Amino acid sequence: MPRINPLMDPFITAATAKLAKFNTPQPKDPVARRLRQQEQSRLSVAELGIPIVDVATEDHTVAVPGHPDARLRVYWPTSERADAGAGLPVFVYFFGGGWTIAGIDDIGWDATERRRAAAAGAIIIAGEYSLAPENQFPTQPDQCWAIFEWAVQHATELGGDPAKLAIGGASSGGNLAAAVTLMNRERNNHPIRLQVLEAPSVDLTMKHADTKGLKTGVPDAILRRLGGMLIDQYLGKGNKAARKDPLASPLRAASHVGLPEALIMTAELDPLRGDGEAYYRALTKAGVPATCIRYIGQTHTSGGLVGHVPAADHIDATVVGAIRALATAPVTYPVLADV
């Protein structure tokens, strides 16, 4: 099969070709679109042979004042639930899906959490937020905050250590994870050791969206229109003020001082690469230790092609290594002058 994009990793091209038979027009109805996405996820996981690791899990529901209840799923690193006080690292994670699709029952995300929990020797708490457009901002950050608070309060009884706590997410989930770090700084200031953001969307004004030079074959104007449609579904059509709200656009917070250390991963062929890389610069300018990695030849979603794309395996191993490292003493970096 000829490569459409000369910049794209050929391993992605090969994996995409295997999944092409599952591509069908997406329904306009949001519920039907989610059902179709769930089926595509199931078929893709089976076609790619992505393993479903046998680990213990437990579901919970958290009340969120003024909003729908939020679900979460706890993943332990083995087939047995850890004993209370076992002191394992705890990683709170939010899935991606443009605020409109996916969830903790999505087989692809479930496989990811199982694999990472087992490999990292850590507890992963996967949080679920209500989907747009039926539910709109600020429902989602408030739900994610409630899930994070629950994780802190129950960490010890789950077998974790609240002093070895990290938070993360991919795409829209990365947006929400970053929002929770801001909420935490202004509220209870729990000690978050690390935030892990995979291809995050952190500026919903789209001022940092980098759609040029991607060679996707889709005009810049269309890419921006598609992105704007998702943002309007999340924030409400025409809600320009919400786009600048720091809980919708964490990059636009007045200050990033005091936020947790960050690991940010972006992809060369992803319009959101500009968001993640600008956020890295904002954090380091504020004196926050941060690392940003741009994966060349990769797309917004290619990180899910584990076992088929070497870069996807590297992303997975990098996240796993960062979670595992929570078990060791944190590094103390010098305070930067003139921050």
Image: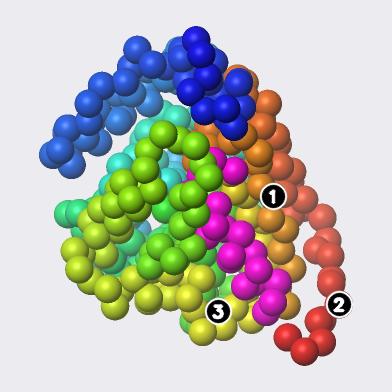
Q: Residue at x 66, y 47 (%)?
A: 294
**Magenta segment boundaries in residue numbering:** 268-286
Q: Which residue is drawn at 69% across and 55% down?
A: 292
- Asked if marks 1 and 3 touch (Cβ < 8 Å), the reply is no
* Mark 2 vs 1, N-terminal side: 1
* Residue 284 visible (yes or no): yes
What residue does disc 1 label?
293
What residue does disc 2 label?
334
Decide: few, some or many residues near mark 2? Use Cα within 10 Å; few <14, some 14-19, many ≥20: few
Q: Which residue is drawn at 54% across and 15% down?
A: 14
C-alpha gap between disc 2 and disc 1:
22 Å
- SS under mark 3: helix
Magenta-span inclusion, residue 161: no
**Which of the two discs, 2 and 1, sits closer to the camera?**
1
What is the count of numbered marks?
A: 3
- The image quadrant where one finds the C terminus is bottom right
Please state the horizontal and vertical placement of residue 62, each as a whole percent of the image.
35, 58
What residue does disc 3 label?
185
